[in-house]
Image: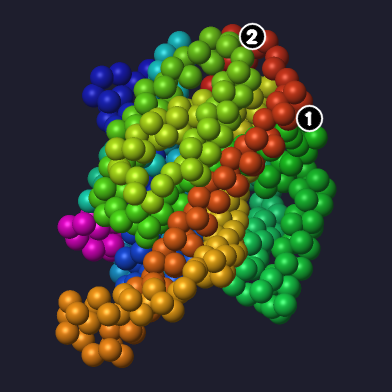
Amino acid sequence: MSKIKGFAKAIIIITTVSAAIMELIDTSIVNVALSDMSGSLGVNIEDISWVITSYAIANVIIIPLTGFLAEYFGRKNYYLVSMIIFTLASYMCGQSSSLLEIVIWRFVQGIGGGALLSTSQAILFDAFDPKDRGKAAGLFGMGLILGPTLGPTLGGYIMQHFSWPLIFMINIPIGILATVLSFVFIDEKEGEGKNKANIKIDYLGIGLLTVGISCLQFVLERGESEDWFNSEAIRICAIVAFVSLATFIWQELRVKQPAVNIRLLGNRNLAFTTVFTFVAGIGLFTSVFVYPVLAQRVLGFTSYETGLALLAPTMAGVIAMPLMGILLSKGVSPLPFVATGFVLFTIYAFINAGISPDIGRTDLFFPFIIRALGIAMCQLPLVNQAVAGLHPKDYATGIGLNNMVRQLGGASGIAIANNYIAQRYAQHRIDLVSNMQDGAAQAGLMAQNIAARTGDAAAVANTKALAFMNLTVDKQSYFLAYLDTFRLIGIFFILTIPLIIFLRTKKKTAEELAASIKAANEAH
């Protein structure tokens, strides 16, 4: 496909980048709609976060399996089926009327979406000649930043003018068009999908990974609300998760054709890189989850204002991403970029941990620029660092493991944030109530003012005064809890930065550089 020119090449670029952006938009578009969705479906904000978490879990499961599935079924066939799954699941999400229903369809959507992202990169990469593949990395890198950035803005606009089902339904025309264009313009690679006889499917490994990750996520997500190990469900899921993941590791080390080749984690450089990637995933996903809820629940932003606050400053990351690709393709060490990115994200987290309740949308511009640059300096450099020290034949597998860890970090980060917010909210509420001076007198004075202004009876005015004071304490407790969560994210990054001394880089030949860029685009 590297010989493709003109119109066909332009169509492939538009189709693959659009499909990837569509998938990435769906990782963040629901964040600004969580409050509306929770009210519509009759659940609390902590429960509705499963809409995000289920999508992330599906990505964690499917990303490391994408290379195997594309080889087994044929890349074009796998791409088309994944796009159809994603589009159909989007429709079903929009039609869902209960939490369980939408969580199930979001999981299915994540299965299709995770495959879309990885396969789109491989197809786009093959449309370029070897000497121009740095441009392909740059184009896709811009999409990696642009997708999550457009998500909150587009979601906010939809929530302000329409209703939450539309955030899923808009995928349908894009998905149909992309499917048709892919069927017509994307060619099959020679021999793809015709080597099934030599591939043995690791059904046990796939099953153990699915069960283990799902149960682990349930424990992390529901532990706080279920009182942790006092709950029988939590105890059972914790045991199942431990046994499943331990057996999964044993299975993958035992078989000749594992679903996920975890033997590569024996490489010290890749092992420590996954630690950085896990923490980067926590920061990336958790910050995008916590900010919209903080902005709407406490700061009083509309959904659209919440998205707009992210859009303009994050464009700095869109510009920086291709520059990272160009520098890395020329052999520049990724370590300085990784260190700088982690420092920038730490600064962003602690700035957000110190904001005031009366902050305006424009006041967030500078912190979000820092966040965007931090993300840009972490994404591709960590992918590049993951393959340092590996043989070229192991690049795709190593990057696939690294990306699985990033998604797992994101899913775990959201769960940790939910639990931490609940704990800190309860503690801050206790502290605020216990330190209120003359609360009864204040409530009485407020009730008198309400009665004088509205003409309400004394009992009614007193009820309104107490309700207002309770709402004020609630709002301030949540505000402080969200700030604590940003501080916790910053601490994760601070604790990780010193581990950079364990990372190593190796001077690559031109062939190895080309192979690493190709692997990054195929396995990201």
Mark 1 surroundings within 10 Å by alpha-carbon count, few (fewer than 14), some (14 through 19), many (20 or more): some
| Viewer-proximal residue among 235 and 361 | 361
Tag 1: residue type?
A: Arg
Q: Which amino acid does label 2 sit on?
A: Thr
Quadrant of the image occupied by residue 512: top right
Look at mark 1 in the image and give the residue it sits on: 268
User: Where residue 254 sits in the image (x, y, percent)?
Assistant: 82, 48
Compared with residue 349, is residue 475 higher up or lower down, i.e. above or below?
A: below
Q: Mark 2, residues whose alpha carbon is within 10 Å: few (<14), some, or many (≥20)?
A: few
Q: In which quarter of the image is residue 131?
A: top left
Residue 464, given in percent of the width and then of the height, sits at: 31, 80
Left/right placement of residue 158 relative to residue 421 reads left
- In terms of secondary structure, what is the magenta stretch mainly? helix
Q: Position of residue 423 (x, y in %)?
A: 60, 64
Q: Is residue 58 left or right of residue 395?
A: left
Q: Nearer the viewer, residue 343 or 25?
A: 343
Does the magenta portion include 12? no
Q: Which residue is drawn at 38% across and 31% down?
A: 366
Q: Earlier in the sequence, mark 1 or mark 2?
A: 1
Residue 425 sits above or below residue 494 on the image? below
Boundaries of the magenta span: 158-173
Residue that numbered label 2 is attached to: 509
> Residue 253, image x and y in percent?
81, 46
Q: Do the residues labelled 1 and 2 touch (CB within 8 Å)?
A: no
The quarter of the picture where the N terminus appears is top left
Dot 2 falls on a residue whose secondary structure is loop
